[in-house]
Image (spheres, rainbow, N blue to C red):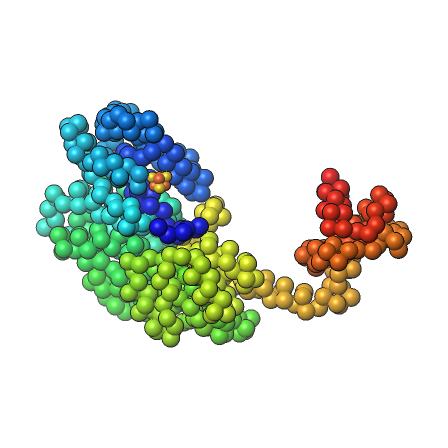
Amino acid sequence: MKLSLWTYEGPPHVGAMRIAASMRGVHYVLHAPQGDTYADLLFTMIERRSTRPPVTYTTFQARDLSGSTADIFKTACQAAVDRFQPEALLVGASCTAELLQDDPGGLARALDMPLPVIPLELPSYQKKENWGAAETFYRLVRAFAGPVARPAEIAPNSCNILGPTALGFRCRDDVEEIRRLLTDEGFDVRVVAPLDASPADLARLPEAAFNIVLYPEIADTAARWLQKTHGMPFTATIPIGVGATRRFLAEARALAGFALQSTGESGQGGKDRLTWYARSVDSTYLTNKRVFIFGDATHAIAAARIASEELGFRVCGLGTYMREFARDVREAAARYGVDALITDDHLDVEAAIVAARPELVLGTQMERHIAKRLRVPCAVISAPVHVQDFPARYSPQMGFEGANVIFDSWVHPLMMGLEEHLLQMFRDDFEFNDEAAASHLHPHATAEQVDAPAPAEAARIWTVDAERELKKVPFFVRGKARRNTELFAASKGIHPITVETLYDAKAHFAR
Ligand code: SF4
């Protein structure tokens, strides 16, 4: 048993759901207790999909345990196939159903349905979401690309993009960015999978010369299998950051047998704004800023490289919650002279952040909370993320435009931090003090408040507790809160002013 409050990853069947929801023509029958449909919300609310994920749950209840849950599973399978008529069926169990040992694969096979059935063995008590996604993708690739032979003639510039998924951090825009980059460079992008691919597309994977692996957490296993089975090489560089994007293109060009002359800095010079922004004199203050980085392995390693090589920050901490990629993160951490933090316990992460004393935290949604508590500027670089990191606007992380997005999203919290710091420093200044108007740009904003008759002296006595509570109000509105509370107390004949009066006044003026 482990006491857990926050988890960085869901159970592995959520990973399998992500693959099913990424693809077309795939349906997933999940043996799961009533209530597990909560996972639908990840897709419909966080990713804002307009359709339900293609998942049928058996939703067995306590009373079903006295009967045959296997029959419930078989009925759900048949109903899903009849209703949705998928091209392929994934079948598996959630954590609770795993304990029942109903064997979804065997049960589905017994139904003898006229479509490929791919059983998933996802050990919920040992593995997690990303592993579940990688395993599911691998099983699907194996099922559809396994039986096909590689064509005799293959265009050397043809490639597939592997790894983008539903609920992946900025996958939607990364794919667009990288596909455009590759097409502009003369590559022929064939299949993108699993995002938007069908089982028939997976069968076409061996027709390309090589594979581009954008998210190793999802696609590494499948890419290795394609290499072993069909002799397809794959890229190892993740194009996050300007330097990495250039190296990625050079690697892809080498795999395609292109001439080398247009690679390198001059080949893509000026395609990003990060390089110039980071070199401009306004960025001098970024030099040696201490940055703590935590996330999935791919994004954490990429962020450390950008922070150190492209923005001039000093990496004071680097870690991941993905044990499967601990070795890669350890190697990266060694390059920056820090010990890698490999943990899925957010309390360990918080302790490490406190010890490292960073000036900027780059992390997941969890680190956003930790940094907020510690009052350290923060930007999100990796899943798990909340709805605001599935934005409507184009926001890749990869490629040259991704580098622009990264520059903005990392530097803005630092600027806001600087502004806040200056406001605190000058809080006794005539423009910024507690009693000044809400903003020095709007000198008349609180004029009526200031001109309002001052309450009698007796109504302006505060208890010690109330004064302490008032200090919790942000300083830039504290003056207004004090005046409003005193006016309220005077009008009601209350004195001295207590914590309760403060909140009554707040409620009164909020009406
Ligand atoms: S089966 Fe797993 S995911 Fe579903 S409620 Fe139980 S522990 Fe959670």
Say which residue appears at 43% left-offset and 51% top-offset. Answer: 6
Q: Could you tell me residue 348's position as x and y percent? A: 42, 61
320 vs 91: above or below: below
398 vs 338: above or below: above
Q: Nearer the viewer, residue 485 or 249?
A: 485
Q: Is residue 252 left or right of residue 153?
A: right
Say which residue appears at 70% left-offset and 55% top-offset. Answer: 469
Q: Nearer the viewer, residue 181 or 69?
A: 69
- Residue 97, visible in the rendered structure: yes
Q: Could you tell me residue 459's position as x and y percent? A: 85, 51
Q: Quadrant of residue 417?
A: bottom right
Q: Nearer the viewer, residue 152 or 135?
A: 135
Number of numbered discs on residues: 0
Q: Could you tell me residue 475's position as x and y percent? A: 70, 59
Q: Is residue 74 left or right of residue 374?
A: left
Q: Quadrant of residue 18?
A: top left
38 vs 240: above or below: above
- Residue 189, visible in the rendered structure: no
Q: Quadrant of residue 75?
A: top left
Q: Could you tell me residue 110's position as x and y percent? A: 15, 29
Q: Is residue 392 left or right of residue 440?
A: left
Q: Quadrant of ligand 1?
A: top left
Say which residue appears at 10% left-offset and 50% top-offset. Answer: 152
188 vs 237: above or below: above
Q: Is residue 311 left or right of residue 445?
A: left
Quadrant (top left, top right, bottom left, bottom right) of the C terminus: top right
Say which residue appears at 39% left-offset and 34% top-offset. Answer: 35
Q: Nearer the viewer, residue 410 or 93?
A: 93
